[in-house]
């Protein structure tokens, strides 16, 4: 049976992973775009992204676009797998209701 | 870690909402506009081919194609700032070469087959464009594969079964279909 993941279950991180997993594998999203999508502050998003990056669930890439620094975020293969397991665990809890 | 069924339900609902919001945001950031843009070009172009004289049609097709290409580049740049695909970036040069070669092959095929009327030339061009779209979709972004197939099928139905109104068919069903599909993605997806 799939296990709940404490790192992912935190509400903001759960929404971050839901957004990133929705993208096609390999695609990455701009930090500011993700911030606006989630309606959180820069600091809040940065802190949660660090936690997810430390766990290996997301990859953060910094690049220059038109001479401006930009940060891109993507779910890793491990992150996608763990997120799907977390969703399966949530569904199994709901079924046992 | 233990949670109640109610908490699980709330978490799943939050995931569902975020998934829909992300899809909608990506679609509204430009993907749907490509479909609507192509649909408008085909709608206007084919309607003019059906009802207007040859010279005016050439000007309309040329003008619409240049406008469409310029808007396409602008939208692509805008989308690339939000969501980017490293694999797609790496293969962009190869994709460009592929499309150039496809144009060459299309011209060669038309030169060899020597089509006798405009409908045959149009059908050849549509088949090659859709073949290119299928190849790009399969190699770069699988989600863009599926819509090339019904468009190809509609074009073939129009060519073989309705030759008298082929251009009108292409304008309304294919051009109009792309516009409706684009609006559907924008509003419902």
Image: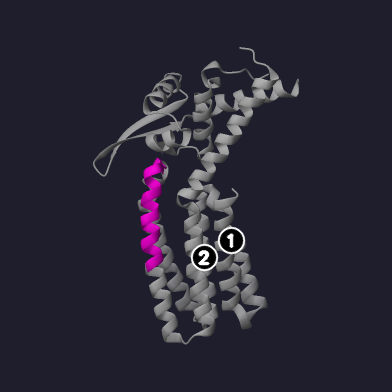
Element under label 1?
A: helix
Q: Nearer the viewer, mark 2 or mark 1?
A: 1
Say whether residue B75 is magenta: yes
By secondary structure, the bulk of the magenta-drawn segment is best described as helix
Marks 2 and 1 sit apart, C-alpha to C-alpha, by 9 Å
Q: Could you tell me which residue is drawn at 45 percent across and 78 percent down?
A: B111
Q: Could you tell me which residue is drawn at 39 percent across and 74 percent down?
A: B62
Tell which of B96 and B23 is nearer to you.
B23
Q: Is the residue at mark 2 from the same chain as the one at mark 1? A: yes
Relative to B154, residue B93 above or below: above
- Magenta region: B67-86
Tell which of A39 and B101 is nearer to you.
A39
Element under label 2?
A: helix
Residue that mark 1 sits on? B180
Confirm or deny contact between disc 2 and disc 1 (CB under 8 A). yes
Q: Position of residue B59 (x, y in %)?
A: 39, 79
**Quick one: label 2, few (<14), some, or many (20+) residues within 10 Å?**
many
User: What is the count of numbered marks?
Assistant: 2
Say whether residue B154 is magenta: no
Residue that mark 2 sits on? B39
Q: Position of residue B160 (x, y in %)?
A: 65, 76
Tell which of B139 and A74 is nearer to you.
A74
């Amino acid at each position: 049976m799939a296990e709940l993941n404490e790192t992912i279950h935190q509400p903001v991180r759960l929404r971050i992973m839901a957004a990133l997993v929705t993208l096609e594998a390999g695609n990455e999203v701009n930090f500011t775009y993700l911030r606006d999508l989630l309606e959180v502050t820069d600091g809040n998003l940065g802190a949660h992204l660090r936690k997810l990056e430390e766990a290996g669930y997301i990859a953060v890439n910094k690049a220059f676009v038109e001479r401006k620094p930009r940060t891109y975020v993507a779910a890793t293969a491990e992150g996608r797998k763990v997120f799907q397991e977390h969703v399966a665990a949530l569904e199994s809890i709901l079924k046992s209701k | 870690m233990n949670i109640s069924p109610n908490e699980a339900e709330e978490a799943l609902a939050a995931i569902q909402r975020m998934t829909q919001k992300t899809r909608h945001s990506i679609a509204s950031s430009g993907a749907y506009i490509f479909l609507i843009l192509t649909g408008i070009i085909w709608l206007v172009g084919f309607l003019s081919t059906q009802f207007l004289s040859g010279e005016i049609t050439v000007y309309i097709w040329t003008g619409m194609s240049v406008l469409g290409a310029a808007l396409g580049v602008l939208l692509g740049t805008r989308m690339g700032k939000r969501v980017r695909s490293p694999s797609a970036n790496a293969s962009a040069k190869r994709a460009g070469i592929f499309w150039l070669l496809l144009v060459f092959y299309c011209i060669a095929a038309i030169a060899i087959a020597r089509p006798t009327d405009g409908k045959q030339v149009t059908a050849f061009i549509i088949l090659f464009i859709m073949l290119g779209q299928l190849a790009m979709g399969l190699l770069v972004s699988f989600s863009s594969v599926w819509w090339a197939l019904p468009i190809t099928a509609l074009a073939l139905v129009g060519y073989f079964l309705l030759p008298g109104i082929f251009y009108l068919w292409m304008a309304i069903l294919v051009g109009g279909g792309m516009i409706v599909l684009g609006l559907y993605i924008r509003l419902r997806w």
